[in-house]
Image (tube, rainbow, N blue to C red):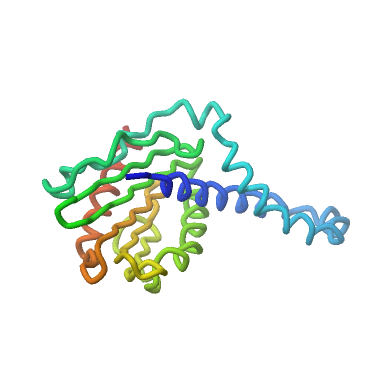
């Protein structure tokens, strides 16, 4: 099983954080604002591409490479004895501080992708979560709904856009971390929302404990 989506998810979160930081840093001085009106459209059009480029090159950042966040992850056995690890955790995927992994239930053709990105603070985590929410229509047909987990908990249930998989996605923040869980199964055998939230709450507890330690 390939965990390429772990890197993609981390990149989306990191890009959203960078864009939010750029926008926040643009306010304040009215004189500067009036002088920069003519160039505002140009700078705003490049902010997204700059964030994306930075996320892809972030592997060169020592801070992103130096921390092992694998202790924040739940274990396959926490979910159900039928699940096994897809492989070793991916540390700091795509050079973004955090960790990602996958769990497989071969008997039921179920896969869970678990990505955690650790940001500078809770505000940055909230920005990252908003970036993930904007990507939901590309991944699942169901409309996002509030989920009773973490801060800003959001869930979407449906199928992949091509209809080949049933998908339930749960995302939320815990302190300065952004968590994204994608639960895939065979069409017509969707992971129920209650089950998805229960797994997400276990992951929330693991993150809270790990960051506090």
Residue 36 is left or right of residue 64, and the answer is right
Residue at (33% x, 71% y) in the render: 158
Residue 99's place in the image compared with 43, above or below, is: above
Is residue 78 visible from the viewing direction of this image? Answer: yes
Residue under the point 32% across and 69% down? 157
Tell me the residue at 18%/50% (across/down). 106
Q: Quadrant of the C terminus?
A: top left
Residue 172 in picture, x, y percent from top left? 38, 56
Q: Is residue 128 above or below residue 161?
A: above
The image shows residue 197 at horizontal and vertical percentages of: 25, 60
Residue 86's spot in the image, x, y percent? 27, 41
Q: Please name the residue shown 31% across and 38% down the image.
A: 72
Q: Looking at this view, is 30 or 132 the one in front? A: 132
Q: How many numbered discs sit on the rendered protein?
A: 0
Whether residue 176 is visible: no
Q: Name the quadrant containing residue 54.
A: top right
Tell me: 77 left or right of 87. Answer: left
- Viewer-side residue, 196 vs 159: 159
In front of the other: 198 or 168: 168
- The quadrant the N terminus occupies is top left
Quadrant of res 177 = top left
Question: x, y (%) of residue 184?
Answer: 29, 59
């Amino acid at each position: 099983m390939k965990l390429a989506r772990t890197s993609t998810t981390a990149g989306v979160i990191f890009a959203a954080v960078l864009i939010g930081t750029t926008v926040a840093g643009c306010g304040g001085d009215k004189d500067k604002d009036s002088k920069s009106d003519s160039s505002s459209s140009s700078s705003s059009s490049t902010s997204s591409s700059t964030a994306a480029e930075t996320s892809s090159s972030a592997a060169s950042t020592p801070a992103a490479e130096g921390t092992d966040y694998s202790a924040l992850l739940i274990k396959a056995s926490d979910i159900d004895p039928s699940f096994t690890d897809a492989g070793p955790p991916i540390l700091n995927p795509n050079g973004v501080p955090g960790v990602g992994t996958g769990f497989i239930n071969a008997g039921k053709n179920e896969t869970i992708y678990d990505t955690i990105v650790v940001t500078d603070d809770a505000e940055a985590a909230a920005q990252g979560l908003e970036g993930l929410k904007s990507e939901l229509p590309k991944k699942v047909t169901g409309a996002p709904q509030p989920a009773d987990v973490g801060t800003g908990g959001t869930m979407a249930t449906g199928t992949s856009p091509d209809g080949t998989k049933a998908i339930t996605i749960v995302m939320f923040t815990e302190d300065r971390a952004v968590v994204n869980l994608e639960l895939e199964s065979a069409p017509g055998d969707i992971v129920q929302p209650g089950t998805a939230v229960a797994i997400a709450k276990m992951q929330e507890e693991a993150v809270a404990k790990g960051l506090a330690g």
